[in-house]
Image (cartoon, rainbow, N blue to C red):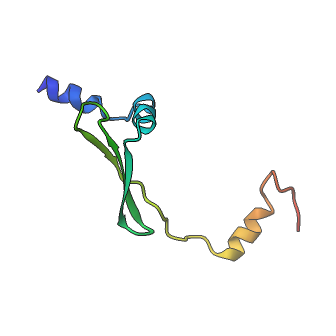
Amino acid sequence: MQSAVTLVKSYVPPNPSKIQAVKDAGKVTIDMLEPGKRARINFKDYEKPGDNLGVQPTLSRPYTKPWRNIASSRQQLPWRGNHK
């Protein structure tokens, strides 16, 4: 059981230097699962030869803020000043 825990910990969280090494080796692929919504990024041979670390980021988020609220909140942003 301890070896299984150790193995999982070698994948989670992903190690940036291992991801960079896989990228540099040209072993990163992207699968579109639902175009515009979901994709899977595959890092082949991430920890061991023949393995695959797959990451599924969300590509789109639902629009939740009406335009009028964006315009009014924009006036309060410190880098925008208080333009009216």
**Picture residue at 42% right of the left edge, 67% below the top:** 37
Residue furthest out toward the left? 1
The percent coordinates of residue 54 (x first, y second) are 32, 47
Q: Tell which of 80 and 19 is nearer to you.
A: 19
Q: Tell which of 38 and 23 is nearer to you.
A: 23
Residue furthest out toward the front? 26
Q: Quarter of the image holding residue 68?
A: bottom right
**Picture residue at 22% right of the left edge, 37% below the top:** 50
Which quadrant of the rendered structure holds the N terminus? top left
Horizontal side, residue 57 vs residue 69: left or right? left
Horizontal side, residue 19 vs residue 62: left or right? left
Q: Quarter of the image holding residue 70?
A: bottom right
**Picture residue at 45% right of the left edge, 35% below the top:** 24
The percent coordinates of residue 65 (x first, y second) are 60, 70
Q: Is residue 46 above or below residue 62?
A: above
Q: Tell which of 46 and 60 is nearer to you.
A: 46
Label total for image: 0
The percent coordinates of residue 15 (x first, y second) are 40, 31
The percent coordinates of residue 12 (x first, y second) are 32, 35
